Image (cartoon, grey):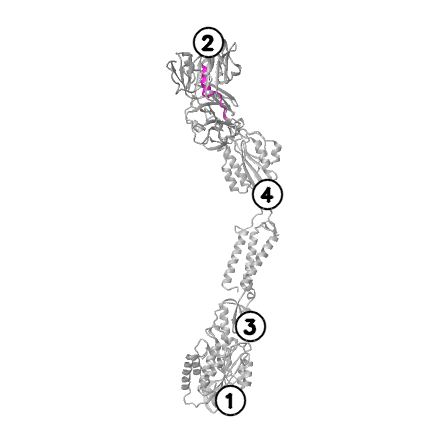
Amino acid sequence: MTFTAMSLSTWVTLFAGLGGAVTLLYMLRMRRRRVEVPFGPLWQKVLTDKQTTSLWRVIKRIFSLLMQLAFIALLLTAIADPRWTGGHAVDFQAPREPEPRHTLLVIDTSASMQATDVEGTRMAAAITAAETVVSSMHPAESMMIARMDRDVTAVTDWTKDRAALKASLRGLMAGDTGTDVAPVMQFARNAVRGLPNAQVVLVTDRAFAPPDADLAKAISLKVIPVGSATETANLAVLDFNIRSHLGNGLKYALYAKVKNYGKKPVRAAVYLYGDATGNARRREDFVKLAPSMEPFYLELAPGEEQIVEKEAVDLVGSRAALLVEPYDKKKYSDALPTDDVAYAVVPVRKSVKVLLVGKPDLFLQAALSTRAAVDVLRVEPEAYTTSAGYDLTVFDMAAPKAPDAGSAIYVNVSGGAVPFAADGTVAGGALNVVSDRATHPLMKFIKFVDIEADRVQRFKVRKGDLVMARTKGGRAAVVAHADQEKRWVAVGFDPIGTEWVGHYSFSIFFVNAINWFFAEESKLIRPWSLATRWDVPVPWKVDRVDVLTPKGAHESALVDGGGTLAWTGREEGIYELRKAAGDKEPIVVAAALRSPEESTLGARGDYAAWVPPEIETEAPKLTVFGADLWQILVLLALGLMTVEWFTYHRRWTV
Amino acid sequence: MGRLFDEGFLKRLEYLHLVSKKLLAGKQRAERRSKKVGSGMEFADHRDYTPGDDFRYLDWQVFARMERMLLRLHEEEEDLTIYLLIDASQSMAMGLGSSSKYEHAARIAAALGYVALANLDRICIVPFGAQILDRMPPTRGKNQIFKVFNFLENVTPKGPTGLEESLRKFVHQNKRRGMAVILSDFYDPNGYDEAINYLRYNRFEPFVIHLYDEEELKPTLRGDLSLVDCETGTVKEITITPRLLAKYREVHEEFCEGLKQFCRRNQASYFRTPIQVPVDEIVLRIFRAGGFLK
């Protein structure tokens, strides 16, 4: 027999204390009221007769006290939790103070945990496994829960509250980001440093580069793996860009990288979606729309990666999403849908109204119309009175009056209301792009191959004027100017008299000019990677901007002194940045996973496995009639109390 | 007029006096007949023989005819003094009921004394406790009743009961024999038999009026108590239960019955009454029971 809940000395101390208190109370209770009687010997005779009956009469006076002391003894013995350990000896054990334990439970919430290669998702399996860890907590064990993806975040503090821990676990969701195990290991080492009996349990699919083995050993890292042990099929878009087509302003150029991570070949269907409404931010929004183009198909061998480049692609709007799916979903079950889609943003094309002032010139009119969203109206120089209502004024051979506002292109205008200074003409020659200006937006893709101009205007280049092209003799042939108020371009020769008008660069020059005037660049806007710092330049002088995330949450993000938003996105999709919530013209950026490690879905590295702790064997409970002994003792104690109460109040024991 | 004897009490005394005159009609004044065996010639009555009686006075004729042992009583004419011995111990002052036993005893003594004085008898009042506390000298004449009142009212019950010691001293102090009316609860740890016998041996005629309180017989006590004897201070711890109370009543009844039997055995008149009975009714019962007024 073993008493597991208290030592003998504790039992004796408690009994002495409680028994003494009960005895004192009993004696106080037994203090008698003094009553005078006329003749005591009569009562004496009564008592003499009664006291001679039996021994019971002698002890009944203390019967109640004995019963109450027995009650205390039974109750204390019940609290001592007697257990059967064999033999006849009775052993009192002081309750052992369990040694404190600490477990840091880290849950992988990276994108790969969204994989459906197990029942539900890997995340659901991870939460179930983590709940098992929580359920197996020792009473003296404290636990902290943290989540990890690209960063590590503590979800709870150290606590022994299993319910709170499980509630925190149930609130975890897999994100869209990759995994970086290094911060996790650093965090774990700091968290368990100096704590006794500490261990780190990581619930993960191991889809990341394994950590340093010595560090893992130092923090006693244990892993609960989740995910299918068999090969997992997965199609992934590893990269996706789209930009305006350089040669065709109406079209776009598409670049994508698609990989088959499965062991089976797959026919993949690729869909391009464009959003003209300006509201689509996530996959669910885009797939509701009609694709911008007919889907195209890729035949991908196992493990094959293909780069897709499409020229002259149609796209509606400025938000794009590329979706890759197995053509036959029954044959090829894609385990990770989140990497099947990628997002991109293209510059918004503005509609430009152009007023051409000059004689009919089909070459020039055609070149101006090359760019999409350009509306050209020609007027005779004599009829020109104002340029109000037009974004751009092109003066061909004559400039009777300066434009009221906006930018202007001057084509072989030698006099009149011009913003530049020119003094007659001089002999020209072969034309060349100034080498320093080859990367200027105005001169992109421009080459004057075998093009000569007989005469060129004698420009007087002033401060702020940029010479874009010169004759072989060094005369300025094309001059541009840009300041806070206006931009203008002057072509100092007559294109009609050259072969330039028959060259493609003639049209590109005017497309570049219009794009330069209206700040539309055809440069590539690359999507940002998730869980990295984004340095997005913003044009507003504010301290904070409103960020609308793909899931529709509004976040307030800081802007540094240089006008750059410092932000880290964790959801793939389209983000909208506004000066203030509700503004109509946001800055739009795209974010994508683009993590081959996550898309691989394969486990890497060998780890020590977490093993459920052994349950400490307790002495078997001694049962009587199916009840624990302590319960029987409590019942006996209550029975004694009942007997004592009954006998006392019925005056049997007094 | 004090607290014990008010106008109403005087009226009741007058009534008792009238009743007593009827009972005593045709008798000479100042001639009291004491119940003595063998001292007179005139047959008075029979009574049951009790051990100790002089069997020379047995009525053998009656025995032969009825097989019953009766004693022949002869009236002896003498001028008796009535001694009213009132127990004034502490137990008589106990007031478990509406009034104390002493107050009741004093009223009875006053009533008896009044009747006696009205009949030109001589009365002497002697209160006692552990010993004789005081003494009102023998008095005769109806007009002395107020003196009796004053004397009784001035007695304060206190101390233990010493029947034997008190009555021995009483006997020594009073050489003139007469009726010794003892009004007491007889709560004497040393008993009462020696005291009563001492009166008898010295030719006093004991007339025992045993007073008790109904509350004493049926106390309303319950629970754990320390019972303190009011005279000796002896403490007895006890837990009162219904069974114990029943036992107590048995013991009390035995005590009363013992006193009664003792008086019968020793030719002493015995009259027991609870103090809850009105005084005039008690006195009339005493008269009707005989022995006091003849």
Q: Residues within 10 Å of mark 4 (few under 14, many from 20)?
A: some
Under mark 4, the amino acid is Pro
Residue A523 sits inside the magenta stretch = yes
Q: Residues within 10 Å of mark 2 (few under 14, many from 20)?
A: some
Same chain assignment for discs 3 and 4: no
Residue marked by disc 2: A499
* Nearer the camera: disc 3 or disc 4: 3
Q: Marks 2 and 1, how far apart in space?
A: 192 Å
Output the chain of dot 2. Answer: A
**Is residue A252 among what the camera can see?**
no
* Nearer the camera: disc 4 or disc 2: 2
Disc 1 is placed on an element classified as: helix
Residue marked by disc 1: B56
The boundaries of the magenta stretch are: A507-527
Q: Can you give x and y, in whole percent of width and height, for residue A519 in the image?
A: 46, 21
Q: Residue at x 60, y 46 (%)?
A: A97
Output the chain of dot 1. Answer: B
Q: Residue at x 44, y 83 (%)?
A: B287
Output the chain of dot 4. Answer: A
Q: Which mark is residue A100?
A: 4
Q: Marks 4 and 2, how far apart in space?
A: 89 Å
Q: Which mark is residue B233?
A: 3
User: Does A355 appear above or below A11?
Assistant: above
